[in-house]
Amino acid sequence: MDTNSENNVLMQTDASDKSNIDYQLTVARQFPRDIQRSIDNSIKIATMSMDTAQSCGYALIKDGKPIVGPSVHLARIVASCWGNVRTDAKVVQITDKQIVSRGTCWDLETNVSSSFDISRSIIGKTGKRFTNDIITATGNATNSIAYRNAVFAVVPKAVVDVVYQAALNMITGDLSDEGKLQKKRCEVVSSFKKNYKITEQEVITLCGRQTIDQINLGELALLLGVLQSLKDGDTTKAGQIGLRPGIAVKLNDHFSFIAKYGFLGYRRNVNTPGDSFGLKLTSEDLSIGFHYAF
C-alpha cells in the first residue's frame, strides 16, 4: 500500500471514529446516568455468583505480605454499569526490551478522562528476549493493568469501594466490626478442624501468622475460598490445602519460572479411600510453569 492510500485509510478511520464519538456524546446528553441505579446494577452483577464475587478482587504477595484490591474484572463491571464512558486498552509499543500498553477511559458526561501507560520488560534474567507467547501474555497483563487504572481514575472511588465491599461481603459475610471479624475467624478455623481435621495452628501457619487474631480480611477471604473448593470436592472432585515445595527462578521483575514437587498438607481423595494429611512425593505432584506478578 502506498503512502497516499495509507493516509486515506487513516482519514476514513478517524472520520468514522469521530462520528461514533459524536453519536455517543449526543446519547450521553439525552440519557444521563442514574448514579444509584449504576451502583445497584454493578452490585447485582458483582454478587451474581460466588465465582464472580471472587473475581472482583486480586491478591498478591509483596514483601511477604498479601495485598488485596479491586481487579480488572470489577473495573469492567463498573464501567459497563456506569455507562456513557469510552474505554480502551491496547499495546502501543513493543521494543527490543519492553512492551507498553495504554489504557484509556473517558466519561462522556463529565468530560473527565484518564490515560495510563504501563510498561513491562520483555528481557529475561539471562538477557534473552522473551518468546512471542510470553510477550503476548505480558501484553495481555499490561493491558489489564492499564485498563483497570484508567477506569478507576475516572469512576469515583466512592462508587468502586461500595461495589468492591459488596463482593467482599458475599465472600466473607458481614464483617463490619472487630467482633464479627473475630467470630468469622473462629468459624472458619473450626470448619477446617471439624470437616477436614486441620488444626487451628496449621491454618494459622498456612496464613503465615502467629495467632488467629492476626488473620486479616484478605486472608480470611482466601481461606473461605479454599473451604468452598473442599466442600465442592465432597461430591464432585478432590480438594486440598497445604504447601507445595519447589523452586522459583526469577526471570525479571514480573515473570518467574516455577517448579514444584510434592505436597505437604491435607488432601481429600476420590480414587482412593480416606483422606490424607502429611507429605506426599509422587509424579502427579510435579508441576512446571510461570508466575506473573502485577
Image: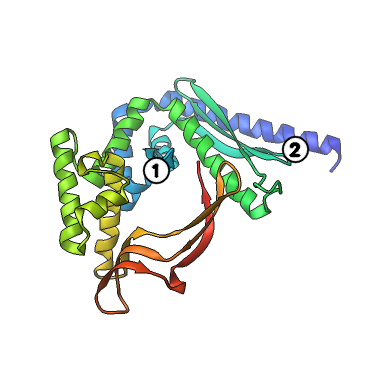
Measured in 3D between alpha carbons, the distance from the residue under mark 2 to the one under mark 1, in whole angstroms, is 44 Å
Q: Which mark is residue 96?
A: none
Q: Residue beneath label 2, please?
A: 9
Rendering quarter of residue 119 = top right
Which residue is rendered at x = 25% and y = 42% of the image? 215
Residue sticking out furthest to the bottom: 272
User: At label 2, which amino acid type do we have?
Assistant: Val
Q: Residue at x 19, y 51 (%)?
A: 188
Residue 193 image point, x, y percent: 18, 59
Question: Which one is nearer the viewer's eye here, 245 or 103?
Answer: 245
Left or right: where 208 falls relative to 132: left
The residue that appears at 18% across and 34% down in the rendered structure is 176
> Which residue appears at 20% of the width and 40% of the height?
213
Is residue 34 visible in the rendered image? The answer is: no
Q: From this viewpoint, is residue 59 visible? A: yes
Question: Secondary structure beneath disc 2?
Answer: helix
| Render colour scheme | rainbow
Residue situated in front as seen by the camera: 215 or 201: 201
Q: Provide the secondary structure element on which disc 1 rests.
A: strand
Name which residue type carries label 1: Ala
Crowdedness of circle 1 by 10 Å Cα count: few (<14), some, many (20+)? some
Give the percent coordinates (x, y) of residue 143. 55, 40
Please tell me whether residue 47 is drawn above or below residue 274 in the rendered image.
Answer: above
The numbered dot on residue 59 is: 1
**Comparing marks 2 and 1, which lies closer to the viewer?**
1
The crowd level at tag 2 (other Cα within 10 Å; few <14, some 14-19, many 20+) is few
Q: Please state, as top left, top right, bottom left or bottom right, where the N terminus lies in the image.
A: top right
Q: Earlier in the sequence, mark 2 or mark 1?
A: 2
Viewer-proximal residue among 147 and 173: 173
